[in-house]
Amino acid sequence: MVKAPAQAQVPQLFAVDAMFCGPGNLGSQDMNEGCFCGDAGFFVLKKSDIYPALPHCEWFCSSLAQATGVPQIPFSVVKHTDGNFWFGSLWMNGRTPDWWNLAQQGSIDFPSLADDLSRIYALDLFVHNDDRHMNNYMVVPVGTGHRVYSFDYSRAWLYHGALPGAIMRDPGLNTVANKVWMKQTFGQYLNQAVALEVLDRIDGIDEVGVRAILAGHPKDWLAQQQEDDIVDWWTNGARAARVAAIRHGVNDGTLL
């Protein structure tokens, strides 16, 4: 059953001001600069020097995560010290490197992460994020356990030059390969019900909702024609057909 339309709640168009910025080894070829923004924290930037639509892709996918119940690290528009505005992900304290090794050793309770990993996977399928490697999960200690968050959508959405096409099934893609590895290592961890819930919530975002997401970032992050194409794709049945195809694969198990 399709749920009531999701409320695409995204931050109003504002920026956190960077106090200083600089290069750093942040574990990704697309994340090579960070900015300290005072009380707001330290943000990892995604800039258009990698490809023009990168800040938009990060904003759009992160906003979808926020609107559909996918655990997402906080994000914002960041005003760089040079005056430009870029996408920024808040770097969370306590990030656990090599968390999957700790899970194999029993130091991290993998089953407690399974539902949120399922939510992230469902969104990755929709936005065609084919490069979800193990370090693209932000695992942090919470209380006596751990919580997993999504971040880094630089190889998703418009990265491939067009709106998403075929559903990811190729085991050569990082997202699929790492899903298979986790299943082989920890057993079938994907929760069909929570994955379907994410898809239902995507299905419930209407034209007003998608326009709100697009309006939340600086206008120059996206060409007007690209914005028009996204709204058209979202409302002409293509988005609904994609959700239906993924839902079918989740229901029959071929995508799990």
Image (spheres, rainbow, N blue to C red):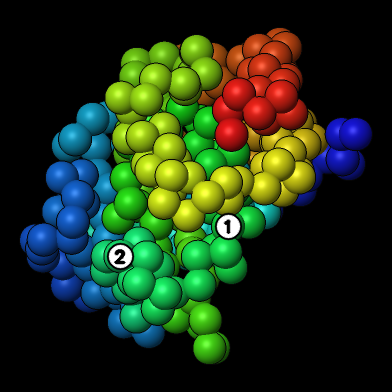
Residue at label 2? 101
Q: Earlier in the sequence, mark 2 or mark 1?
A: 2
Q: Is residue 255 left or right of residue 248?
A: left
Can residue 112 be seen by looking at this rendering?
Answer: yes
Residue placed furthest toward the bottom: 144
* Image point (37%, 84%), residue name: 39
Label disc, if present, on residue 246 of the rendered structure: none
- Image quarter hosting the C terminus: top right
Q: Position of residue 166 (x, y in %)?
A: 50, 13
Q: Quarter-wise, where is residue 160 in the image?
A: top left
Q: Residue at x 30, y 55 (%)?
A: 135
* CA distance for labels 2 and 1: 16 Å
Which amino acid lies under the numbered mark 2 shown in the image of this protein? Asn
Under circle 1, the secondary element is helix
Residue picked out by circle 1: 114
Q: Quadrant of the N terminus?
A: top right
Residue at image x 23%, y 30%? Answer: 51
Residue 52 locus on image (x, y percent): 27, 29
- Helix, strand or loop at mark 2: helix
| Residue 26 lies in quadrant | bottom left
Closest to the observer: 118 or 18?
Answer: 118
Residue 13: image x %, image y %? 52, 53
| Relative height, residue 235 to residue 54 (above, below) | above
Q: Residues within 10 Å of mark 2 (few under 14, many from 20)?
A: few
Q: At 87% across and 40% down in the image, what residue appears?
A: 3
